[in-house]
Image: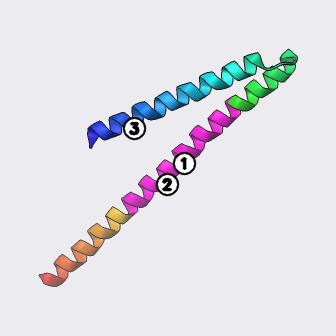
Amino acid sequence: MKKQNNYWLTYAKATFAIAAIAMIISIVKLPGDLIIKGYYSICSLFLVSATITLSKAVRDEAESDRLINKIEEAKTAKLLNDIDD
């Protein structure tokens, strides 16, 4: 399982790098003034930042739900053990 997670992490990093490089190349090759290129660059950075923030928030929420479920299971197990005793 660890090896599969390592492959997934490598894939995610590689696709992010490829997408970032493609975006940089497309902005540099974009016909137009420097102000237009700057605008698209700032928008791209904001999009990347928002994506990272969203993915972290979703992951944190999933981990929180998992912890709450573990606590509820522990409480249930304790109640069942108390009943059995």
Dot 3 surroundings within 10 Å: few (below 14), some, or many (20 or more)?
few
Tag 3 near tag 2, CB within 8 Å: no
Q: Is residue 21 left or right of residue 66?
A: right
The image shows residue 21, relative to residue 69, as above or below, that is above
Secondary structure, mark 3, is: helix
Numbered circle sitting on residue 57: 1
Query: Nearest the camera: 52 or 71?
Result: 52
What residue type is disc 1 on? Ala
Residue 85 image offset from top left, x and y in percent: 11, 81
Query: Nearest the camera: 18 or 57?
Result: 18
To which quarter of the image does residue 26 belong? top right
What residue type is disc 2 on? Glu
How far apart are labels 3 and 1 at the CA level? 20 Å
| Residue position for label 2 | 61
Q: Is residue 54 left or right of residue 29?
A: left
Report the magenta stretch's main SS. Answer: helix
